[in-house]
Image (cartoon, coloured by chain):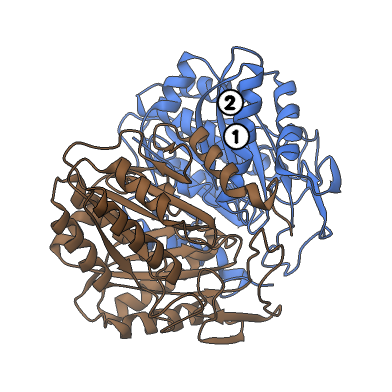
Chain colours: A blue, B brown
Amino acid sequence: MKKLINAPEKVVEDMLTGMVAAHPQYVRKLSGYSCLVNPQSPITNKVGIVSGGGSGHEPSHAGFIGRGMLDAACAGNVFSSPTPDHFLEAAKVVDSGAGVLMVIKNYSGDLMNSQMAEEMAEFEGVKVTRVIVDDDVAVKNSTYTTGRRGIAGTVFVHKIAGAKAAQGADLDEVKRVAEKTVANVRSMGMALTPCIVPIAGKANFELAEDEMEIGMGIHGEPGITRCKLAPADEITSTLLEKIIQDLPFGKGDEVAVLVNGLGATPLMELYVINKKIAEICAEKGIRIHRTYVGEYMTALEMAGASITLLRLDEELKALLDAPADTIAFKQF
Amino acid sequence: MKKLINAPEKVVEDMLTGMVAAHPQYVRKLSGYSCLVNPQSPITNKVGIVSGGGSGHEPSHAGFIGRGMLDAACAGNVFSSPTPDHFLEAAKVVDSGAGVLMVIKNYSGDLMNSQMAEEMAEFEGVKVTRVIVDDDVAVKNSTYTTGRRGIAGTVFVHKIAGAKAAQGADLDEVKRVAEKTVANVRSMGMALTPCIVPIAGKANFELAEDEMEIGMGIHGEPGITRCKLAPADEITSTLLEKIIQDLPFGKGDEVAVLVNGLGATPLMELYVINKKIAEICAEKGIRIHRTYVGEYMTALEMAGASITLLRLDEELKALLDAPADTIAFKQF
């Protein structure tokens, strides 16, 4: 296992320490918890936005703490959900009295732990509600999931709910736009290589030198098909067709595009993918309002990429366009 | 070779097309040239800043085009310098009459081609001057280099020269702060794995499963030592000690830190490295003004990282802190 770490059991702690050291203006650590929060929390009259999940998806989720996105992020062990006490503490710290929205990806552990936190928070007088993101069109039900998996589309939920909260909207309104985002966002990914969970020390599956897996999840969950490596244009078409047919997206729709690297894929290759996305959307009369290319929701050192489309109306467009100032998502 | 590309000989063209499609507000392509420029070029009365080099280091260099950094970037073939006509055309397009600074990394091909462009530009009445970046303390002379190599510290030169130009300084002043940055910036990297140039189709060296190379260059040039993989803290100490001793950096110095991923290294691991950097700097009384962590100067899918320190005075600090709005470097 080739990793720049000190010890598998220390990697999340070391990472959080290094993150706070790098970006003290954006994040502080909650003592005794594996959570980072905006140092200005709670922000008066603002609905708090909390996200989190297993570590290994950086910059998700703490990289999105800051003005116009998240107030807190809970970091579980690698690919393992944070326990309820972490979600609860984060919610309590960011609550200004306006309540807290938790943005949760649809994995069994995250669902269970965040639900318990929601119930415990209610008991402590903090109003918490959740939105569950399940944007991955590849498979229904998966290794750790009932229903669809939540992947990179989650970042759009962070952005849009965060923008709405920054405008001073109440919890119901923030939840409404978050759910509207979930209803309009679709993603799918593919992998060229597996990744290695530090504590396991070895990859949990193998792909031959000429193989790829279409529809693979961000923890290495099985996809739709394992097949021979193909040219980028062909792979992009395969992913995008399935995404487009799912909602479905159609002629005249306006979308935001996210081309997300899974960890080891050069930015060069993500732009090669984006070339084909732009061509296909142009052919189909789907208008692209904004495109994001980079690493947003990774899977350690997995090589591969995912594509996300978000259908926009005027409300979502304005919220997507609103400024954000976080570690890994800055928009003027 | 597992890459998300269409054909090795098309990868740079496809990438540039995808980049313009993603970020038309930041970059347009010069027809007939492998160059991207700010669509607003030339900016009245502003010194133009041009950079470039071989492709494969994304987001360098086109990712830094925008307000407060570069006006243009020339993209050679992978790990191969752009020819003089590309540098010349870029300089001509961004010149407002105030002249152009080219920021060049110290590799023989880049030096030769940019020098020819400088001479040709003079012949055409465009005032061009260059700054050569050689921040890599690992080795003197290397595969493609006489003297030291230019690596991730180049990004600080882009930032500081770009900020000075944005303030309306003249060419001499912009060059002066760029050279001051070069004089105060030091970097060193290490690799866990090689990378594959698409047209070659295979790695140009191998590292055993338990080996790393300290001081490796961003094209896979040999470093100082090949040795057994060590804990991240130990690797960080090795790199940072050599960097600190070189300038030398000392007690009371104020610095900016850049922890740069080479392509396949998870952000998690870069933050683990930063934890140790912060500890060592605190021990030595070196004050950290700002820290950047992420992929800035990559080497395709190489796993590994580099560390850069820039010693700041009040002038450099103000220029580093100035706003920037580019594809891959945004600062409010």
Name the residue beneath numbered marker 2: A310
Locate the C terminus of chain A by quadrant: top left
> Which quadrant holds residue B14?
top right
Against A291, residue A177 (above or below) is: above
Query: In the figure, is residue B202 to the left or right of B82?
Result: right
Q: Where in the figure is residue A242, as x and y percent of width and height?
A: 75, 28
Pointer 2 chain: A
Q: Are marks 2 and 1 in contact (CB under 8 Å)?
A: yes
Pointer 1 chain: A
Examine the rendering and report whether any part of residue A319 can be seen.
yes
Against B325, residue A244 (above or below) is: above
Q: Nearer the viewer, residue A291 or B236?
A: A291
Q: How many marks do you count on the picture? A: 2
Q: Nearer the viewer, residue B161 or B55?
A: B55
Q: Nearer the viewer, residue B327 or B265?
A: B327
Name the residue beneath numbered marker 1: A153
Q: Where in the figure is residue B275, as x and y percent of width and height?
A: 43, 69
CA gap between label 2 and label 1 equals 8 Å
Query: In the figure, is residue A304 to the left or right of B172?
Result: right
> Which quadrant holds residue B213?
bottom right
**Residue farthest to the top, as pictured:** A252
**Residue type at tag 1:** Gly
Same-chain status of marks 2 and 1: yes
**Residue type at tag 2:** Leu
